[in-house]
Image: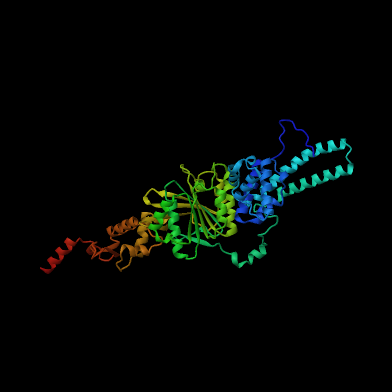
Amino acid sequence: MTKPSLAQDQVPPHNLEAEQAVLGSALIAAQQGDIRTFLTALETLDPGDFYGTAHAVIFTALGDLHRGGHVADLVSVTDRLRQQGRLDDCGGATYLTGLLNTTFSPVTLAQHVAIVRRDAAKRALGELGGYLQHHASNGQDLDALLMFAERTLTDAREAAHSVHSSQPLGERAWTDRISGAELADDETSIEQAWLPFLRQVGVVGRGLVTLLSALGKAGKTTLLVHVVRALLLVLATLRIVWVTEEPRSLWRARVRRFPELASPDLMLVFASGRPWAQVLADLEREEADLVIIDTIRAVCGIADENDQAAVTAAIQPAIFQSRRKDWALVFAHHLRKSAADVGLGHAGSHALVGLVDVAVEMHRDSHSSARRVCKAISRFTETPSEWALDLRGEEMYALGDPSVLTAAETVRRVQAVLDETPRSRQEIAALLEPQPSRGGLHNALATLVRERKASRHGRGTKGAPHRWSAAGNTFIHALSPIRERTEIGEGAG
């Protein structure tokens, strides 16, 4: 067909970014062995649908390899084009490798295929007028002209339909559907399955996405380390994949420090600049119960985290992946340096908070260097709105609602558990839920003794450690050892 001439400022409809995303998704799907997704492109598009000549050549190579019984991955496609002498025409090996970074996951392949089809159909319609004029003027049969025009219009209608009906997961029909009546009787999905988050429920759950943000070096990775330690201790079959920005040497020291982490069920993935699309492709092959991405800024390859479209495009494929695989997914992120209302403190676009199920902000406690306060917004009523954490030596504890940890409230709670039995500080702490900090408990006991509402026993030595009971003869128990010896001597005389 002879294409009509266009004015220099007339550019035919096209979307090179969508064409790149189609090729990148197809390469990733082939590498993953996801032939069904790969065929979404191969069986829907033709080389002529690509505006970019290099893209058409690459797409042809994909099809030739597949039809020849080969996996059309990056190495195979690059080799085929090199053998054909067309690799340089397609931008070289560097350009082909860069295609993997044009999409975050094959999950969106159907959407990008639909865009390419749409623009190809628009170009065909634009060319249709010139074709009809040329061939009508040269004696072409009317029926033949009508048949060609109808075929072009039919293809355009199908392309338009594909744009409106394409599903994010590349499906042309609903695959995960259930009626309200069936769901009401479904005993397998009545309750959300939560994983314990240092004794807190409602923070991390199967099939859910949690965002955990804190200022730099505020301890979000430390918190996640202690969460994972606890999970590996209590859930023997739990499989955890942690994608980390930290160096291998730091993790080696951490694993040696905490023996629980030296587990075959904890798989560490060192991002090391690996493209986010490749990370998602690798995760697709993992069998996991909990996946941690630490941090979004380092791993997900978002150039501008204030760009709502970029944030959504990067994060949403991982969310779809976690829903489909029933993972608990945790994104570690950063807080803005300026104070903000709960839910607005997470750095970057507010779209991020809208995408996740639970968004947690972790702040330093101004009253204790070892304490952190977590504030959350959530889709679930089980999620606490606020709770405190305390790092004591090598262990981290969830202390519960900070409102019950004030000095006056701690005094009241300690007094309530004291009775006539003398108990050590550790034994008293075990009776309290949530447990106050060591310093908070010490101050509360000192206050109760000073106000003669509690008795302190022992000299505070190894052989006679301090113990506390409810107020009895507080005056006698509060005497110093010297006063006690004086009174005993006077009595003996």
**Circle count:** 0
Q: Position of residue 266 (x, y in %)?
A: 47, 59
- Quadrant location of the C terminus in the rendered image: bottom left
Q: Position of residue 190 (x, y in %)?
A: 59, 64
- For the point 86% across and 42% down, the residue is 145
Q: Can the viewer see residue 154 in this picture?
A: yes
User: Among all residues in the image, which is located at the extreme left?
Assistant: 493
- Quadrant location of the N terminus in the rendered image: top right
- For the point 87% across and 44% down, the residue is 144
Front residue of 465/55: it is 55
Front residue of 158/343: it is 158
- For the point 36% across and 65% down, the residue is 417
Q: Position of residue 430 (x, y in %)?
A: 37, 64
Q: Can the viewer see residue 52 in this picture?
A: no
Q: Quadrant of residue 433?
A: bottom left
Front residue of 134/218: it is 134
* Applied colour scheme: rainbow
Q: Position of residue 414 (x, y in %)?
A: 35, 61
User: Going by the image, does 152 lie left or right of 56?
Assistant: right
Query: Does 244 sit above or below residue 478?
Result: above
User: Among all residues in the image, which is located at the extreme top?
Assistant: 8
